[in-house]
Image: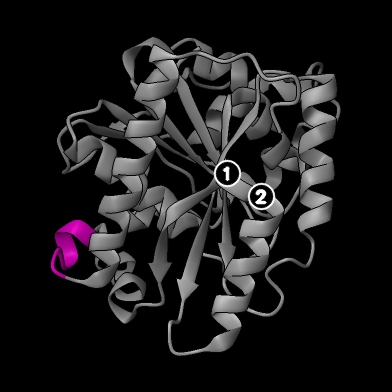
Amino acid sequence: MGNIFVIANQKGGVGKTTTAINVAAGLAAAKRKTLLLDLDPQGNATSGIGLDKNQLDGTIYDVLLNQSAIDSVCKTTNIPELDIVPANQALIGAQIELVDSENREYILKQAIDSIKDRYEFIIIDTPPSLGLLTVNALVAANKLIIPLQCEYYALEGLTQLMDTINLITQSVNPQLELAGVVLTMYDHRTNLAAQVAEEVRKFFSDRVYNTVIPRSVRLAEAPSFGKPIFIYDYRSPGATAYIQLVQEIIEKEDKSKENPVQKENPV
């Protein structure tokens, strides 16, 4: 299996889609052929990378409902080496329509399996919930990145997320492992942010990325222009942080290929 990363956290507003867009764009900029897969009915990764989510002739919804092959809805982007499987609000109905489907947790995995050899990295953006769409992403992936906001409620719900992930690894996807936790929206001016970061590092130890993503107006603005931060403002602290995060991800993955280690408990 290749590098299939799911970006997941059932809590909204933690920088999940921002991380998905900028990690995917950064990997592509590093000449790693990358696919960004939007699995959120809000379609923010789709619009954030420059596509009009209201003018699509095919989306991941059509793939999940077995109406289209995944390669038929895959789009190129303005960024070399980066493709996207888009989403829009049609995806809202998928969770209901898939409830009675056979092997419903494996539908996305089966679709991705048909194209995964074309890409060095596949990045899946998920909705802020632990519903069927997110479960499909966790089953399809072999690596998990958890964005965690450096604020008071950051750790709230984390136990539920980890319980779900452990259930997935024990039942349907033993290959899933925690690639890392990325601290987002960090405000260096507050003691609270430092305290949350310290608690997270205590809990997850070396599985927290060294790079911390700062709270940034430019990061918040970039999606409204349909651009990753590297294109919108490559001199900004947010761009610098995501460049560093992408470097960490690449170095970690290259190292794991050179020295594969079998883990008893991946998550």
Number of other residues with Cα within 10 Å of mark 2, as a class: few under 14, some 14 to 19, many 20 or more: few
Give coordinates of residue 247: x percent, y percent: 29, 42
Residue that appears at 38% across and 13% down: 258
Q: Disc 2 on helix, strand or loop?
A: helix
Q: Where 129 falls versus 29 (above or below)?
A: below
Q: Which residues are magenta?
A: 229-235
Q: Where 70 falls versus 181 (above or below)?
A: above
Question: Which residue position is annotated with label 1?
Answer: 207
Q: Nearer the viewer, residue 30 or 135?
A: 30
Q: Disc 1 on helix, strand or loop?
A: helix
The quadrant in which the C terminus is found is top right
Q: Kindly identify the amino acid type of the residue bearing the numbered disc 1.
A: Arg
Q: Kindly identify the amino acid type of the residue bearing the numbered disc 2.
A: Phe
Q: CA distance from mark 2 to mark 1?
A: 5 Å
Residue that appears at 62% across and 52% down: 127
The image quadrant of residue 191 is: bottom right
Query: Is residue 195 highlighted in magenta?
Result: no
